[in-house]
């Protein structure tokens, strides 16, 4: 509860010139703020168009309203903070997307390499090699890229097992 949350929920500025008169409105917040020496609170929405992402709060040690000029400056600061936060979120999302795409590309490359190893060693078409690779991964509950890495790095004798599986049809 409090002016900050009210501002966040409504997207509108909240001005409390004398917090002592608002104890019944915010019974948990007001006494604590007063005990800390704050007697006025002004909350300004941090929003982009219709979406409110937070609130900038100014706590005062004297009762009273903020002058118009200071209100405009406070809202401008809230707007700048909003832009900064949204920009940081966008950069973070882009970094995550780039990392995911790079991972997918690396996985795809190693899968293609593994298909080539299987196809060459078994004298198979690439499509059949991929089917074997995928089936092995599914049957052993292992990610396709992990199986491919093991094949390419020669860490496992998976290829022999794959080819025997192909030669010996299931019963």
Image (cartoon, rainbow, N blue to C red):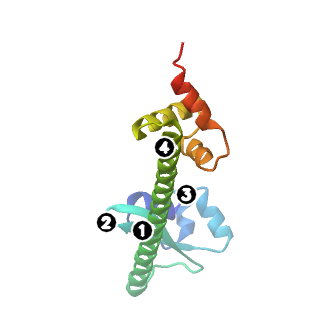
Near-viewer residue (69 or 171): 171
In percent of width and height, residue 15 lies at 45, 71
Q: Nearer the viewer, mark 4 or mark 3?
A: 4
For disc 2, the marked residue is: 49
Position above or below: 9 against 116: below
For disc 1, the marked residue is: 45
Residue 115 disc label: 4
Which residue is at a point 38% across and 65% down the rendered structure image?
12
Near-viewer residue (76 or 128): 128
Query: Distance from label 4 to label 1 (Cα)?
Result: 56 Å
| Quadrant, the N terminus | bottom right
| Quadrant, the C terminus | top right
Position above or below: 70 against 87: below
For label 3, the crowd category at 10 Å Cα-Cα, with few meaning under 14, some 14 to 19 and many 20 or more, is some
Q: Nearer the viewer, mark 4 or mark 2?
A: 4
Query: Distance from label 3 to label 1 (Cα)?
Result: 19 Å
For disc 3, the marked residue is: 26
Query: Distance from label 3 to label 2 (Cα)?
Result: 28 Å
Label 4: which secondary element: helix
Q: Residue furthest left?
A: 49
Mark 3 or mark 2: name the one nearer the start of the chain. Answer: 3
Q: Nearer the viewer, mark 4 or mark 1?
A: 4
In percent of width and height, residue 27 lies at 59, 56
Position above or below: 77 against 95: below
């Amino acid at each position: 509860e409090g002016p900050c949350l009210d501002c966040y929920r409504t997207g509108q500025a909240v001005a409390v010139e004398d917090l002592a008169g608002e104890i019944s409105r915010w019974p948990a917040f007001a006494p604590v703020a007063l005990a800390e020496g704050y007697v006025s609170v002004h909350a300004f929405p941090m929003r982009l168009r219709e979406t409110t992402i937070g609130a900038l709060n100014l706590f005062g040690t004297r009762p009273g309203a903020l002058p118009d000029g200071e209100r405009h400056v406070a809202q401008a600061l809230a707007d700048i903070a909003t832009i900064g936060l949204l920009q940081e979120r966008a950069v973070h999302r882009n970094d995550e997307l780039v990392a995911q795409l790079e991972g997918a590309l690396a996985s795809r490359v190693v899968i293609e390499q593994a298909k080539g190893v299987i196809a060459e060693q078994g004298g198979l078409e690439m499509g059949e090699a991929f089917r074997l690779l995928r089936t092995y991964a599914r049957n052993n509950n292992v990610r396709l890229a992990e199986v491919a890495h093991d094949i390419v790095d020669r860490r496992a004798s998976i290829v022999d097992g794959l080819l025997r599986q192909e030669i010996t049809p299931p019963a």
